């Protein structure tokens, strides 16, 4: 199996490369984000060990660009920062696992073994309804090549509507799948967010994609 290590600290990089080679892996190394990104786009790796705080582009951006370019090798992200927000940032950028420095090499080896045991990753399906396009990886929405900025909850609601395009979805269904079972507010929150979506993805483009189904809920019409 072939791995890529992207680490700007020469001593740490040498330690990782030497240790992983002793574990039987073929290992390439890069010392900054630019070289790391070039390597991962030019070669097929079974996993990438990626330091978050490398010279720009940083590890988060490298991971994000990898996924945007359709490179789905598992990524183990390393960082000296252990704040929850940093871990979330890395995972949201497309990393598969996260390891905080300092760490034991044996743990890193175990995490790499776990990642390489998984089936090869496939890109999540890009959802389309006419010229409305939702990309779950980049968390972006476009219509007619115009990017439409959405809040996280608006994005989640549109994702559920597009995932089940053509189906009438009740307010209860949408609350359970977009909010959660513990949500104790009124069902009118769905109406509020549907209105927000219509103002962003339909009306500026002269469309009527999100339809009200009387007595049932809402349906996204893929042919609207």
Image: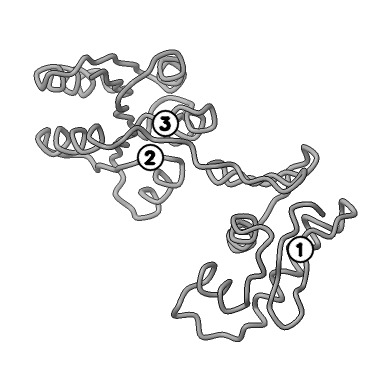
Q: Picture coordinates of residue 143 (x, y %)?
A: 77, 44
Q: Earlier in the sequence, mark 2 or mark 1?
A: 2
* Residue under numbered circle 3: 72
Number of numbered discs on residues = 3
Q: Which mark is residue 162?
A: none
* Residue under numbered circle 1: 210
Q: Which mark is residue 95?
A: 2
Q: CA distance from mark 3 to mark 2?
A: 10 Å
Q: Are marks 2 and 1 in contact (CB under 8 Å)?
A: no
Q: Are marks 3 and 2 in contact (CB under 8 Å)?
A: no
Is 66 displayed left or right of 126 in the figure?
Answer: left
Residue 213 sits in quarter: bottom right
Q: How many residues crowd around disc 1 within 10 Å: few (fewer than 14), some, or many (20 or more)?
A: many
Looking at the picture, tell me which residue is in the foreground, 84 or 123. Answer: 123
Which residue: 49% across, 80% down? 183
**Rendered position, 170 above or below 18:** below
Q: CA distance from mark 3 to mark 1?
A: 33 Å
């Amino acid at each position: 199996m072939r791995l890529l290590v992207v680490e700007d600290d020469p001593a740490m990089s040498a330690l990782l490369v030497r240790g992983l080679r002793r574990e039987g892996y073929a290992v390439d190394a890069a010392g900054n984000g630019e070289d790391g990104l070039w390597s991962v786009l030019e070669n097929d790796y079974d996993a990438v060990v990626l330091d978050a705080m490398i010279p720009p582009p940083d590890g988060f951006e490298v991971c994000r660009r990898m996924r945007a370019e359709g490179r789905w090798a598992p990524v183990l992200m390393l960082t000296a920062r252990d704040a929850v927000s940093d871990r979330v940032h890395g995972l949201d950028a497309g990393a598969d696992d996260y390891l905080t420095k300092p760490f034991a090499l044996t743990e890193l080896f175990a995490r790499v073994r776990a990642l390489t045991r998984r089936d090869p990753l496939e890109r999540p399906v890009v959802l389309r309804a006419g010229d409305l396009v939702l990309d779950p990886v980049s968390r972006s929405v476009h219509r007619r090549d115009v990017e439409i900025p959405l809040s996280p909850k608006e994005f989640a609601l549109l994702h559920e509507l597009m995932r089940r395009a053509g189906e009438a979805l009740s307010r209860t269904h949408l609350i359970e799948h977009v909010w959660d079972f513990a949500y104790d507010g009124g069902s009118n929150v769905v109406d509020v967010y549907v209105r927000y979506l219509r103002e962003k993805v339909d009306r500026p483009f002269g469309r009527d994609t999100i339809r009200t189904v009387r007595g049932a809920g809402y349906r996204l019409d893929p042919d609207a």
